[in-house]
Image (cartoon, rainbow, N blue to C red):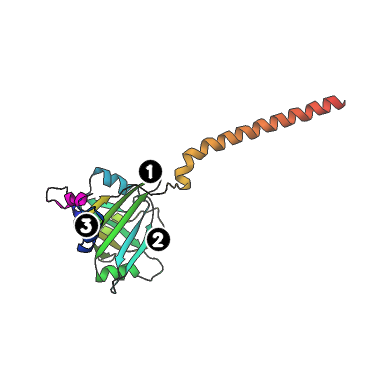
Amino acid sequence: MSRAFAEISFTPSVRALQEQNGSAHGYAKFLNPDADRGDRVGPLEAEFISGSDGFYQASVTETGWPYVQFRGGPVGFLKVLDDQTLAYADFRGNRQYLSVGNLSDDNRISLILMDYPNQRRLKVWGRAKLVNATDDPQLVQRLQDPSYRGHPERAVVITIEALDWNCPQHIPQRMTIKELEPQLEPIRAELSRLKAENETLRLALEKSDTSTRL
């Protein structure tokens, strides 16, 4: 756990519950000034982010409600610009502009990146800046995958305030069809072999029955 995460998340009400339930002493070390700050992207985080094809994103409405949505795209669409900056191209969608509206009023943002096959997750807290495509077309072009169909309206640039690798406990293990392919291919090959073998045996049996009747 990072100190930046603890400073953001361990509010007075949270600390009070930790005291009440006996966990405050164990978590106090993460608030120590000597604890690792945890607000920079390292090699492990960069590799994880670059291999992701989606994340859950939370923003806050003007009336104080949390709003969470899933953002998906080609692998690596969330870019690491430097060790404290992430960005992605925001494509035209249903034109509700919920996240855009929220971030225009309150730039606080939180991401959760999931790796279900390996039961890992990375949490990110930051401040988002919305950059219209017409204001910085070079940035948007840098973020856009030319093979991905979609019209980018803006870039979302996130200055990181905290990172945290969350506990893997209770993360279900799930795999996409693409991730299952290495396991499915041998099964398909074996099924094809068995079908061919079965067909050979069937033809041999038919031939034997014909010979017996003659």
| Picture disc at residue 150 | 2
Callout 1 secondary element: loop
212 left or right of 10? right
The CA span between labels 1 and 2 is: 30 Å
Which one is closest to the eye, mark 1 or mark 2? Answer: 1
The CA distance from mark 3 to mark 2 is 50 Å
Q: Compared to 160, does 47 lie above or below?
A: above
Please tell me whether residue 214 belongs to the stretch shown in magenta.
no
Q: Is residue 190 above or below residue 3?
A: above
Task: Indicate whether 112 appears above or below 43.
Answer: below
Taking the spot 49% from the left edge, 38% from the top edge, the residue there is 183
The numbered mark, 1 or 2, whose residue comes first in the sequence reads 1
At 64% across and 35% down in the image, what residue appears? 195
Q: Nearer the viewer, mark 3 or mark 2?
A: 3
Q: Secondary structure at mark 2?
A: loop
Q: Is residue 34 magenta?
A: yes
Give the dominant element type of the magenta stretch: helix, strand or loop: helix
Q: Mark 3 or mark 2: which comes first in sequence?
A: 3
For image coordinates 27% across by 43% down, the residue present is 44
Residue under the point 27% across and 46% down = 46
Q: Amino acid at mark 1?
A: Asn
202 over 180 or under it: above or below: above
Q: Disc 1 marks which residue? A: 118
Give the residue number, with chain letter if any, for mark 3.
Answer: 19
Instruction: Give the crowd class for mark 2: few <14, some 14-19, many >=20 residues within 10 Å.
Output: some
For the C terminus, give its image quadrant: top right
Q: Mark 1 and mark 3 in contact (Cβ < 8 Å)?
A: no
Question: Is 103 situated left or right of 212 in this image?
Answer: left
Disc 2 marks which amino acid?
Gly
The x, y position of residue 211, in whole percent, is 83, 25
